[in-house]
Image: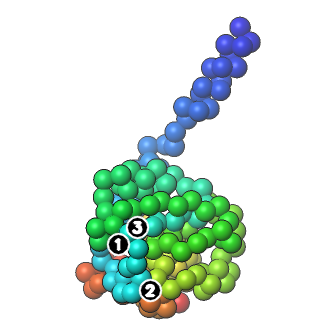
């Protein structure tokens, strides 16, 4: 009987999934990220056969991004999802999503990233700290901030079509 209880307990842990509201939020964020890629001029940073999206920190966004990567491409390039757990592990990726669950301080980290990397955060103040885009919830809706200086510093250009939907933030 004890063994059965332990097995049921272990199964309940592995069968746990995030609340539906969180799942919906991250599905939407993943779709936003994919669509951002269509409205960024990557300039000379369109090298290679793959378009990489990195995730820094544990995040429920990894699963919906992986699902997008199965069926979609960016500029006819296969999408590859990379997972980073510490800032010092980050290697070049076209888009770096920085999870609010990231336990590391971002002081100075964003300024050390390679040219051609579009940074996207989801924590209060990330745009002011240097992320190119940052997801926020305003009026119970998912919206995004854009830091034009950070986009430019990364050597990228965002289309006016994308920026017209953004909340512009000064760094």
Of tags 1 and 2, the one toward the viewer is 1
The residue labelled by disc 2 is 151
State how far apart marks 3 and 2 are (Cα).
Answer: 21 Å
Q: How is the image coloured?
A: rainbow
> In the structure shown, which secondary structural element does the residue marked by tag 2 occupy?
helix
Return the residue nearer the eye: 118 or 43: 43
Residue 75 lies, with reference to residue 113, above or below; the image says above
Work out whether mark 1 precedes mark 2 in sequence or the reverse, and give the earlier one: 1
Q: Residue at x 50, y 86 (%)?
A: 115
Check if mark 1's residue and mark 3's residue have beta carbons within 8 Å: no
Give x and y (percent) for residue 67. 38, 50
Q: Secondary structure at mark 1?
A: helix
Q: Residues within 10 Å of mark 2 (few under 14, many from 20)?
A: many
Residue depicted at 72% across the width and 13% down the height: 3
Instruction: Say whether disc 1 or disc 3 marks the residue closer to the N-terminus.
Output: 1
Quick check: 111 left or right of 3? left
**Quadrant location of residue 8?**
top right
Residue corresponding to mark 1: 37
Q: Position of residue 152 (x, y in %)?
A: 44, 91
Which residue was labeled with disc 3? 50
Identify the residue at image location x=44%, y=61%: 80
Judge from the rendering whether residue 96 lies leftward or rightward of residue 141; answer left or right: right
> Of discs 1 and 3, which sits in the foreground?
3
* Vertical order, 71 against 5 (above or below): below
Q: Which label lies toward us, 3 or 2?
A: 3
What numbered label is drawn on residue 136? none
Q: Quadrant of residue 128?
A: bottom right
Residue ranking furthest to the left: 161
User: Which residue is farthest front?
Assistant: 48
Q: Give how far apart the Cα atoms at labels 1 and 2 are.
A: 13 Å
Q: Is residue 55 above or below residue 131?
A: above
């Amino acid at each position: 009987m004890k063994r059965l209880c332990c097995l049921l307990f272990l199964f309940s842990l592995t069968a746990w999934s995030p609340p539906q509201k969180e799942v919906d939020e991250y599905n939407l964020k993943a779709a936003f990220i994919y669509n951002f890629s269509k409205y960024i001029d990557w300039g000379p940073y369109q090298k290679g056969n793959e378009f990489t999206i990195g995730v820094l920190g544990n995040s429920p966004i990894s699963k919906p991004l992986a699902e997008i990567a199965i069926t979609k491409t960016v500029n006819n390039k296969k999408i590859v999802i990379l997972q980073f757990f510490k800032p010092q592990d980050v290697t070049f990726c076209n888009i770096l999503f920085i999870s609010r669950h990231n336990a590391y301080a971002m002081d100075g980290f964003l300024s050390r990233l390679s040219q051609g990397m579009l940074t996207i955060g989801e924590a209060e103040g990330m745009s002011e700290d240097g992320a190119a885009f940052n997801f926020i919830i305003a009026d119970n809706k998912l919206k995004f901030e854009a830091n034009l200086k950070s986009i430019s510093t990364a050597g990228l250009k965002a289309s006016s079509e994308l920026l017209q939907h953004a909340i512009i933030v000064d760094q």
